[in-house]
Amino acid sequence: MTAIPSPPPPPPPTRIYGLLAEFDAPERLLAAADAARREGYRRTDAYTPFPVHGLSAALGARDTRLGWIVLAGALLGCVGGFFLQWYSSVIHYPVNVGGRPFNSWPAFMIITFELTILLGVLSAVVGMLALNGLPRYHHPLFNVPEFELASRTHFFLCIEARDPLFDLDRTTAFLRDAGASRVVAVPYESLVPPASPATPPPPEQIRHGHGPDAPHPAPGHTPLLLALCCLLLVACDNVNRGMDNEARLEPYEPSPFFPNLQSARPLVEGAVPRGHTRADEHLNAGTVNGAPAETFPFPITREVLLRGRERYNIFCAVCHNETGDGQGMIVLRGFVPPPSFHIDRLRQAPVGHFFQVITSGWGAMYSYSDRIGVEDRWAIVAYIRALQLSQGADPADLPEHDRRLAEEAAP
Amino acid sequence: MTSLFPLTPPGGDHAPPLIERIRRAALVAGVAGIVLCVLGVFISPAAFFRAYLYAYMVWLGIPLGAAAILMIHHLTGGRWGAVARRTLEAAARTLPVAALLFLPLLLGIQHLYIWSHPDAAAADEGIASKRGYLNVPFWILRAIVYFALWYGLVFLLTRWSEREGRAGDPADRARLVALSGPGLILYVLSMTAAAVDWVMSIDPHWYSTIFGLILVVGQALSALAVAILVLALLSDHPSISTILRHDDFHDLGNLFMTAIMLWAYAQFSQFLIVWMGNIAEETPFYVARLAGVWGALGVLLILFHFALPFLLLLSRVTKRTVRIIAAVAAGVLLMRFVDLAWIVIPFANHVPLTTPDAAAPSAPALTGLHWLDFVTPVAIGGIWTAMFMRELARRPLLSPADPRLRPEEGGRHG
């Protein structure tokens, strides 16, 4: 610095954003903000390292519109959340869940509540940013180097130049009387040289962001440390080999060790995966001597039928419907309808036929062999037989109690 | 300072005359209510005891809730607690009166609790299996333990606080903080057990694990409502108006809204779980409460115990205007009676006490509300309010040693 002979005096800024007053303690800032409001200043703002209770009242901050934005967001979440569930469960995709009404509003409450909170919070964040004019790249206050103390130790009050009462000299004097330890004019542009020297000289405290005597940040050790860390990371490899990086071959990896240059060895000829033996033709293919089986491969007990009903309602009822009439929920939504189980052709069909359809698919129905085991397929077939019986049963076959119930239900 | 903080108990002319007026009126109402209650015992003991139990649970909630709010304040701090502290302590100190008012229930065990009938247990396997817990001597013993525990908490809370106010010893502050954490846990656990004993056991088959919490949150709500009402009533008194700020009502209002939401949360959680489970052991609770007059009271609860106060308290204006927030607090305090009536009375109605030793064998089945349900809150409330006003006048209404109430320090939350 001494090498430069008599630097020219710092040029005054052309346009001033406002006056920034610095205070040592929150109480002084509060008092000054209060005094500014009483004086009639309206375009004021304060900057503090921590929230100062009562400051917004001292600044005369009016109720913002944020509360209404949050309320609107919360109401939207509340109504929208309920509507989404109500529409999908009542109008578009009504599914009977445990015998409850389609409009199971108590169950909708949780998601309604969550969406109320979610949209309320999101609109609070977005609304706060929007009302504050954020994000923005720069603010004139950052042209004052001391301003960074606002996030550390000092308390600032800014009276903006667009305030009708603003007058550079009088406002400066007012702020100093209000207890400011320093008053700084905030320039709009820090880099543009002054257009006219005729602007009034600023108070002697004015400092310019990038003036010739502005301190430059000392070069730290950060780059060196970063480089060292990278070196250490590189060194870690191969030193501490974990189990995630073992010296072994991946499947299908090339390997010069074997004649065919593959790491994987072929299976022994005739190997069968565990549980995949298919020796019993009746059980596994649903055929007896190549023709669809007329009988079940194992005795059908009450447990088997109950299991079949459970599996049927899980896998089949969406299309075939719970009664087997082929009018399931997916069909009602436009899917190709399967035939009813209660037509003559299917009443006459051998049980092996149903088994084969489940195993291999039929028409629009794809194979279920990968998700329903063979025993379960037979259980479902048994349940289909029970459904067929139920739809064409003779009342005389019913037990006494059930017959009475049926007669009472359908007079 | 002495002009702002009455250091000596403001007896006689120092106490706001309003307190004395309320005390006299409450005493008159209480005595009149007791006369009617005595009449009611002879007309229909079954109706009297269920009415007495629900009203008692409301009024008991105020001292207990006050103790809980005090402990929360000691743990968290804040100016709202500093201004409400003496009021809450006065409410908590009425606990011995509340314990005395519990005694009539001992006479009503046979009328309220079916498990107290030996032949009921013989006829019902469910009751027989709970005899080890639900029997009269053990029930009385537990009640003694609860009151002893609560009185111990209140005694220490108010004694150390009063000493701190007089001597300003920081050790007392530390004691209060150390007591409040375990104290809150003990209070919630013991109140849950008391709720099971006194209310839930009316129907020995029905159970809900959140039941105690519903009552606990309701108690905190009642105590906050009373604190807001008292501060609002006394806000014109010169020694208080200089200290009390709109910010204090704002903070109390926020806390009040939180308690209202927590109450709704607990009530709805129980309902949702029972509704989803839809099993025969749990649904009778709501079957009995969703029809007839109880269904109407349930709608009233949703509207005026939750929706309206919640929407009103969203606004800053409500929380900062003394008259409005006092009106909201009064409304919610009124709804506390509806809440507990809705919880307690249908229990007693749908569990029949048909054994011959129950009085009035030919009494018609009680289903809806009874005139005694309106008398007992006045009888218990009159006595309780008179005692509360007496306690309120006995000590300074603002703690003189509390640094949070000094004007120059008042701006900061601490």
Image (tube, coloured by chain):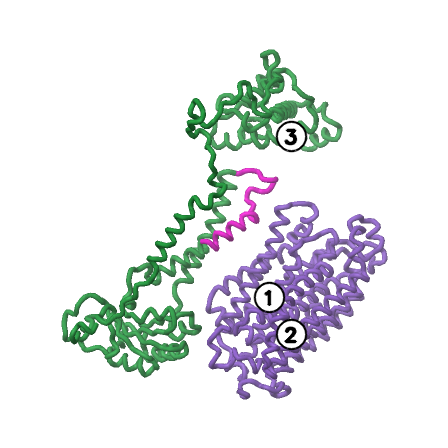
Chain colours: A green, B purple
Q: Residue at x 54, y 27 (%)?
A: A370
Image side of residue B43 versus residue A192, left or right: right
Q: Amino acid at mark 3?
A: Arg
Of all chains, the one bearing label 3 is A
Labels 1, 2: front one: 2
Q: Which residue is mark 1?
A: B221
Q: Is residue A391 visible?
A: no
The residue labelled by disc 3 is A307
Mark 3 on the same chain as mark 2: no
User: Where residue A305 sits in the image (x, y, percent)?
Assistant: 66, 27
- Amino acid type assigned to the residue bearing label 1 in the image: Leu
Q: Chain of mark 1?
A: B
Give me the C-alpha separation between circle 1 and circle 2. Answer: 20 Å
In magenta stretch: residue A361: no
* Residue B244: image location, x then y, percent: 51, 78
Where B349 falls versus B281 (above or below)?
Answer: below
Crowd rating for badge 3 (residues with CA inside 10 Å; few <14, some 14–19, many 20+):
some
Letter of the chain that mark 2 sits on in the rendering: B
Instruction: Give the residue number, with chain letter if any, for mark 2.
Output: B157
Q: Residue furthest top?
A: A289
Q: Is residue A71 above or below residue A351?
A: below
Could you tell me the amino acid type at mark 2? Leu
Query: Secondary structure beneath disc 2?
Result: helix
Locate residue B411, reporting x and y percent.
46, 76
**Discs 1 and 2 share one subunit:** yes
The circle on residue A309 is none
